[in-house]
Amino acid sequence: MSLWGMGEARTLGIYDLLRDACGHEVRWWLTYLGSAPLERQDCVADSLQRTPQFMFYHPTMQEVLLQAVADAGAEVRRGTVVREVRPGTPATVVVEQDGRTEEFRARSVVGVDGRTSMVRK
């Protein structure tokens, strides 16, 4: 996680959860050319945020966060394809799963399906 992401994770209240479940802080960033070390950067001393890098295995991080939102009461669905997002108050999201189409109304829509996200469009 980039240095600025540490502050964001703390603000969102997920930093401790991630650290305890799957993450670790890395103060030193080492750059190599082949096997030759080129640079050793002190992330804490050299960053505006004064924080280390934060490393985790991405699939584990996803599972930890998905479980946390489910525990908080969110409905988590996988294998769903967003077919349409209609802005409004509330927004409408049309999804397809297992050949069925459903519409949902939501105060907030978060797209976590990559660069070709329907939400992003």
Image (cartoon, rainbow, N blue to C red):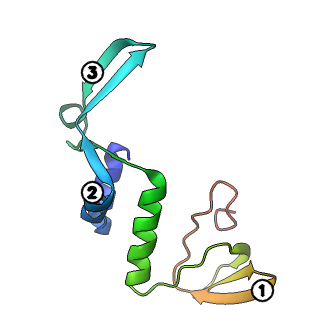
Measured as percent of width and height from the top left, residue 19 is found at 27, 57
Q: Quadrant of the C terminus?
A: bottom right
* Residue holding disc 3: 40
The amino acid type, in three-letter code, at marker 3 is Arg
Marks 1/3 in contact by CB < 8 Å: the verdict is: no
Position of 37 with respect to 94 (left or right) is left
The amino acid type, in three-letter code, at marker 1 is Thr
Measured as percent of width and height from the top left, residue 116 is found at 70, 57
Measured as percent of width and height from the top left, residue 13 is found at 28, 68
Q: Which mark is residue 101?
A: 1
Secondary-structure class at tag 1? strand
Secondary-structure class at tag 3? strand
* Residue holding disc 2: 19
**Which sits earlier in the primary sequence, circle 2 or circle 1?**
2
Position of 72 with respect to 81 (left or right) is left
Tag count: 3
